């Protein structure tokens, strides 16, 4: 029990370490950059309300999150888009933590010794409470927990708990201060209940704009130019850039592949000589999904696996170890463990060990050295002989299409560091060695297109399409209005629709806050429906999909008794919802108002 408490205090100590990032002081240098009009401190990755975030601090937290993601996603390598998403998440968490710390300071919130002592004795963190050694009959047993606290061996764990609550209690007080503003009125309760419980069933005719041919619509040049002028700001394009680059691929060489094959052959011989296949798969297979099951793939029939794998597996005898066989996934050693016939089709059960071709450290070093040599040579002339040097080295100079700041780079994807540097420097600037996925590149800013308004002629066709859609909607509305004039009474609705070859559909019962079959969550359709009395026919209703004519078939009215019965439960749920909304809005307001300098693009 004592060991368990100390084990869980590691988690508490980690929470203490990251709860108020802004209170921790780091100092470390790694080079930094000089930006246009701004000299950036060495190793500074950003600041939030004046509190500096150093690279080492950010990178340490980031690596911890990468590790968690690799473990949860069962992978050795995270793709660039996931790493980028995690970097954003870590940064946003730091922003939130610091702006909240500022609010704690602003209101002078703190935790008294008595408050800390009470929480340590009676309310440990959930991860401690949920441990079986502190539970009796599946519930947290405070006496077992307090017994562990009294043990002198747990002194450091107790201190960690005290530190945790000394920091978290002021946060709780801040949250309570914000949420104390939330109220739920009787009117809100009534409206919420009615939205979920009042029901309507309607019939309708849809006049679909898409059914109206655009070829029948006349759109003039004058109309298009007027639209362009009115919406000119929508056609503003931000500054865009192009880069030329040299790609140094770190793919396995022929020698690397020979070594991988030799490793596979050695392991195959070990298996033939009697090594346990399942244990060997667990330790060596790079198919993470099957490795944990000893390489077992279960039963499969023909057509379920890639052809080379399938042919090898179906030609082997039960118990035979075969391979290696090469597929697009790598090299496989296969052991067939069973065979059966089901519904006239033969199936085999097999286990496998997968090896992928890997780039050796020697190959990676050679590629890195070549790239660094070219980078040094380019630096001597500030990149002026970029193409000449590439030609001497028999390397292809590639060029991207136009891309915007912070956006996708054609041919590269979301390469945030490369994008950031491309917009940080002047045209002609040549980078040092940069990473791109598992490869290396050197790049040069080759062209710049300043912010501009796209010329009318380039957007003319898209404007024409927009105006055509608007005219289709207008025509649908006119046809609906004309049809409504034909319906002299609600009783004639379906008969008149039939005579005009219009389809009448029925929704079935739906609520004000719900989903309407074949219509969706269309506020105008739903609002118009609930304003009708039973049997009543609406006027034209312009909804999301087109213009509707709606007839009320039946209505489930407000149930006062049910409302009184559910009132308290509904109030609690609505209070929680409003608190969450208020807290999110409050946090967003704090974040938006923070003074943030973000230099991450220069490091990642």
Image (tube, rainbow, N blue to C red):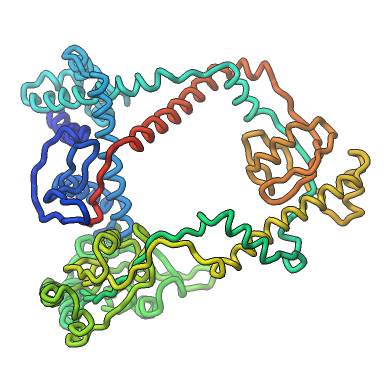
Residue at image location 38% in from the left, 35% down from the top: 588
> 405 or 122, which lies in front?
405
Name the residue nearer the viewer: 467 or 496. Answer: 467
Q: Is residue 350 above or below residue 473?
A: below
Residue 59: give x, y in percent of width and height.
Answer: 18, 49
In the image, taking residue 539 as reference, residue 109 lies left or right, namely: left
The image shows residue 596 at horizontal and vertical percentages of: 27, 41
In percent of width and height, residue 9 lies at 16, 31
Instruction: Examine the image and state in which quarter residue 122 appears.
Output: top left
Q: Give residue 43's position: percent from left, percent from top.
A: 13, 50
Asked if residue 21 is positioned above or below residue 518 in the image, the reply reads: above
Between 238 and 81, the one nearer to me in the picture? 238
Is 466 placed above or below 311 here?
A: above
- Number of labels in the image equals 0
Q: Quadrant of the C terminus?
A: bottom left
Residue at the spot x=63%, y=42% of the render? 521
Q: From what the image shows, is residue 83 above or below residue 380? A: above
Q: What residue sits 30% from the left and 42% below the top?
A: 92
* Res. 277 visible in picture: no
Which quarter of the rendered picture does the N terminus lie within? top left
Relative to 13, is 73 on the left or the right?
A: right
């Amino acid at each position: 029990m004592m060991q368990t408490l100390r084990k869980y205090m590691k988690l508490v100590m980690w929470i203490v370490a990251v709860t108020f990032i802004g209170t921790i002081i780091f100092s470390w240098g790694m080079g930094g950059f000089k930006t246009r009009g701004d000299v950036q401190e060495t190793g500074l990755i950003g600041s939030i309300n004046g509190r500096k975030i150093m690279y080492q601090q950010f990178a340490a937290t980031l690596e911890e999150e990468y590790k968690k993601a690799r473990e949860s996603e069962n992978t050795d390598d995270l793709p660039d888009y996931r790493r980028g998403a995690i970097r954003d998440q870590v940064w946003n968490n730091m922003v939130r933590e610091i702006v909240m710390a500022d609010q704690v300071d602003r209101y002078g919130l703190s935790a008294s010794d008595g408050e800390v002592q009470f929480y340590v004795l009676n309310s440990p963190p959930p991860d401690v409470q949920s441990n079986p050694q502190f539970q009796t009959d599946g519930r947290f047993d405070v006496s077992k927990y307090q017994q562990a606290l009294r043990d002198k061996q747990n002194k450091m764990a107790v201190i960690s708990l005290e530190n945790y609550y000394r920091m978290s209690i002021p946060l709780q007080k801040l949250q309570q201060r914000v949420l104390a503003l939330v109220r739920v009125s009787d009117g809100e309760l009534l409206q919420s209940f009615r939205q979920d419980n009042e029901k309507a069933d309607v019939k309708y005719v849809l006049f679909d704009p898409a059914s109206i041919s655009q070829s029948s619509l006349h759109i003039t040049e004058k109309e298009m130019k007027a639209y362009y002028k009115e919406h000119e700001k929508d056609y503003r394009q931000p500054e865009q850039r192009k880069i030329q680059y040299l790609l140094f691929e770190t793919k396995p060489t022929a020698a690397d592949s020979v070594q991988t094959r030799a490793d596979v052959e050695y392991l195959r011989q070990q298996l033939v000589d009697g090594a346990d296949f399942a244990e060997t798969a667990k330790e060596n297979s790079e198919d993470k999904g099957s490795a944990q099951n000893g390489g077992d793939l279960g039963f499969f029939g023909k057509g379920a696996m890639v052809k080379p794998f399938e042919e090898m597996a179906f030609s082997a005898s039960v118990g035979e170890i075969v391979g290696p066989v090469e597929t697009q996934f790598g090299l496989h050693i296969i052991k067939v463990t069973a065979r059966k016939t089901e519904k006239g089709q033969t199936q085999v059960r097999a286990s496998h060990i997968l090896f992928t071709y890997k780039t050796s450290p020697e190959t990676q070093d050679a590629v890195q050295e070549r790239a660094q040599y070219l980078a040094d040579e380019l630096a001597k002339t500030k990149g002026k002989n970029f193409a000449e040097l590439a030609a001497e080295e028999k390397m292809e100079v590639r060029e991207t299409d136009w891309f915007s700041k912070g956006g996708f780079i054609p041919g590269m994807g979301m390469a945030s560091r490369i994008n950031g540097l491309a917009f940080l420097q002047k045209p002609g600037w040549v980078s040092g060695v940069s990473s791109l996925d598992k490869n290396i590149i050197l790049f040069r800013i080759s062209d710049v297109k300043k912010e501009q308004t796209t010329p009318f002629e380039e957007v003319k066709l898209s404007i024409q399409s927009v105006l055509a859609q608007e005219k289709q909607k207008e025509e649908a509305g006119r046809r609906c209005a004309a049809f409504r004039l034909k319906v002299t009474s609600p009783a004639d609705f379906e008969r008149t629709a039939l005579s005009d070859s219009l389809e009448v559909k029925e929704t079935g019962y739906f609520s004000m806050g719900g989903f309407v079959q074949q219509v969706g969550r269309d506020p105008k359709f739903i609002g118009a429906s609930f304003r009708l009395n039973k049997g009543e026919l609406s006027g034209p209703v312009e909804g999301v999909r087109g213009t509707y004519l709606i007839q009320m078939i039946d209505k489930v009215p407000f149930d006062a008794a049910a409302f009184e019965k559910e009132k308290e439960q509904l109030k609690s749920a609505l209070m929680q919802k409003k608190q969450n909304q208020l807290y999110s809005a409050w946090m967003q307001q704090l974040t938006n108002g923070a003074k943030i300098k973000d230099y991450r693009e220069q490091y990642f």
